[in-house]
Amino acid sequence: MDFEEAEDINGVRFAWNSFPSTKAEAAKIVVPTGVFYTPLKYRGEDLPVAGYDPCYCQNPQCRSILNPYCSIDPTGFWICPLCGNRSQLPPHYQGLTQDNLPLELRPDASTIEYITAKPVQQPPIFCFVVDLCQDEDNLNAMKETLIISLSYLPSNALVGLITYGTMVQVYDLGTDGVNRSHIFRGDKEYLDKQVADMLNKPVVAQPAQMGMANSLQRFFLPLEIVEDQLTTTLENLSADPWPVAHGDRSLRCTGSAINVATSLLGNTYSGFGARIFLFSAGLCTLNPGMIVGNKLREPIRSHSDIDKDNAKHYKKAVKFYDAIAARAVKNSHAIDLFGGCLDQVGFLEMKQLCSKTGGVLLLTDAFTTSIFKQSFLKLFVKDFNDYLQMGFNATLDIKTSRELKVSGLIGHASSLNSKGFNVSENEVGIGGSNQFKMCALSPQHTYAIFFDVANVAPLPPNAQSYIQFVTHYQHSSGTYRMRVTTVSNILTGDEQILAQSFDQEAAAVLMARVTLFKSEQDDGADVLRWIDRMLIKLCQKFADYRKDVEESFRLHPQFALFPQFIYYLRRSQFLQVFNNSPDETAFYRHILMTEDTNNSLIMIQPTLTSFGLDLEEPEAVLLDSVSIKDDRILLLDTFFHILIFHGRTIAQWRKAGYQDQEEYEDFRRLLEEPKLEAGELLVDRFPLPRFIDTEEGGSQARFLYSKLNPSTSYNSQDVSRGAVVLTDDVSLQVFMSHLQKLVVSGSN
C-alpha cells in the first residue's frame, strides 16, 4: 500500500512510515515522527458502517476498540495489540472463524464507523450573526446567499438570528407574524447570566436539565416551523441607521455581538452541536473587542505595528476573543467567520474563535463575490444519503501501543487535558493530552499528530507499533457516531529501511505546520533560522557526501524534493508577510492548518501546467521563470488562485481574434483547454479560488511572477531563457548550492 492509498482508505499519511525503534534513534532523524489524520475522510458507500456499539478492551488504561490487528483466542478472548491485554468477547461473538468474522475484524475495516445507541437529544443548531454596517449592494447579496442556504439545512435544524451595528439585536422567532427583537448595547461586555436575565428567564444550560422549561430556546426554533418568518426577516433587514460623520468609521460592535451569541447558545444548548456564523463587513470599532477606533485618522494596525507593539488595541482584543473561544469550546459550539470587505475586518485578533473550535475562516473582497457565495454554500454539501458532510461536538482520542507516546497536535482543535499514560512530556504543538476537542468537523479537516518514541531498549526485527484514532461526533442525521482508525507501523533500527519509508511530501507539510505554530510565538527571523537548521541536519543525516566536497553531495530519491519544498515554504505568504495584511496572513495560515497533504503542498509549491499547439497533452513544467514562453499558455494553481497566463505570441493572436475564425479551430481549442482544466480544479476546492486571466505584460501577471523561482532575474548573468523576474530573492539553484556547502562543511 503506497502513501496516497493509505490516505484514501484510512485518512492517514505518515512522514515516516517506519518508526525508529528507540528514543535515541528518534532524536537523530530531525523530522518528527508525525502523521496527518483526516477523521471524516470521505469514502462514500465504501466505508464500513456498523449499526451497534463497539467492543472495548477491558484494560481500564487502554480501552481500545476491537480491530483487524487483534488476535482471537479460541477460548473466546481477544488480545489487544496496543496493550497486550486479554478481553472476553461478547457472547454473540463466540465461535468465530475466518469465514464469519464480524465487520470490525475484517481486513478492510482498519477504518470503521459505528452508529451508537446513544440518542441525540437535539438536532444541529445554526445561529446567524449579521453585520448591518455595510452598503446596500453588499448587504443584499449577503441576505440573498443566507436565504438560499436555508434550503440546504436539515428541516429539523434549529436556527436563530442576531444582527448588529451600533447595537446588537437578538430576534425572537417564536412570535408569529411579529418581528420582535431584544436590544443589547454594543459598547458593553455582558456576562452569560446577564444575557439570560435580560431575556427575562433563568439560565438552564446542561443537557441533563433540558427537560426543564427554558424559554430562551424560543430564540432557536426548527427551520421547518420558522423558515418563512426567518426569510421575511432577512429580506427586510436594512443597513444600520446610526449616522456616520464625515471622517469617521461606522460604529460596529462585532465583539459584543459574538459575545451575546456565545452566551445565548451556551445558556440554552451547552453540550450540543451548534455553529455560529458571523458575517462581518468591517472592523470592530467599539469595545469590547475593538480593533481600531472609529476615527479614520487612526490607521489600522499593520504587521510592523504589531511587531513593534504599536497596535494599542491588539492585545486587549486578542484576550477578549480568546476568552470567547474558550467558552465556545466548553459549550461544544463552533464559530465561523466570514469577511466581505476590501479592507481588514479584524480576523487576526479573532482567529482563535475558529482555530480552537474547528470553524471556518473566509476572507473575501465583498459579499457580492462568487468566492463568498459559492464557498459558503459549499459548507452544506451532502453525502450519498443526503446528509450534511458536517460533524458536530467531536472529540479525538489517540491510543498507542507502549512504544509510542503522544507529543501533541497541530490543527484546529483544543486540548481536553487528558493526562493518559501515553502522553509525552516532550510537547509539539498542543501537547499534554491524548484527547482533543473539535466542535466542528468536515471531510477537509486534517490534523498533524506527533509521537514520541518511548522505547529505550532495542527491539526484535519487524517489531510493530500500533496507533488507534477514535473520533466521537454528532452526525447530521441525528445519531452519535464513532469513527475508528487503527494502523500499524514497523519499528526499526535499520537506517536504510527508515530512509525508504520517508514520505517527503508529508514531511514537508508537517514541518510547515510546526513552523507556523512556532511563528505564532517566535520572531519570524528566528523561525526561518530554525527551519534552515532542520534542513541542514536532515541532509547531513541522510545525504551521501564527502566532507568539504560540494560536488559529492547526493540525496536519495525519497529526500530529493524535500529541500525545494522548504525553499518554496520560506518564500511563501505563510512566512513572508510583506505585502499581506495581518488578516490575510491569518486567513492563509488558517487554511494551511486545515487541509491535507496534497492541498497543503499546492499552497507551498504551486503547480504549473503548460499548454501549446505543438503539445499533444498539457505538461507539468517547472515553477520557474524559464517556463514562460511566447507560444505557451500556463495554468498556475496556488490553491487560493487559479491563473491562466498567455505568452506574448498567444496574447497577440488572441487580441487579433484568430480564435473566431474557422481556419484557426485548433487555436480556439487551445484557449479553451486551460479553462476546462481550471473548472475541474474548482469543483471540490474550499474556499473557492480567485480566477485570474492574464497575459505577459498584464498587471495581474504579478501573481505568477511572485511564485516563480527567479532563475532568470534582473541580476542573473544569463537572461536569454525565459522571463526576467524583478526580485532580489535568491533562486532555487543558489539556495541548493548554499545548502550543499553548509552540509558538506559540517555546519549547523
Image (cartoon, grey):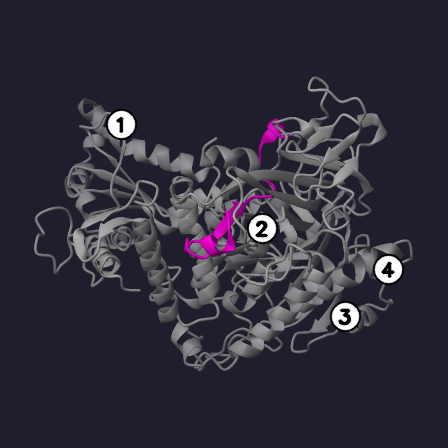
Lower position in the chain sequence, tag 2 or tag 1: 2
Lower position in the chain sequence, tag 2 or tag 4: 4
For residue 53, above or below residue 227? above
What label does residue 404 carry, if any? 2
What label does residue 215 carry, if any? 4
Residue for badge 3:
192
Do the residues bearing badges 3 and 1 touch, measured as CB atoms within 8 Å? no
Residue visible at 35% across and 41% down in the picture: 558
Q: Residues within 10 Å of mark 2 (few under 14, many from 20)?
A: many
List x then y, in percent, for residue 583: 46, 65
Residue visible at 25% across and 44% down in the picture: 645
Do the residues bearing badges 4 and 3 touch, measured as CB atoms within 8 Å? no
Residue for badge 1:
617
Q: Residues within 10 Å of mark 4 (few under 14, many from 20)?
A: some
Instruction: Compute the Cα span from label 2 to label 4.
Output: 50 Å
Q: How crowded is mark 3: few (under 14 residues within 10 Å), some or many (20 or more)?
A: some
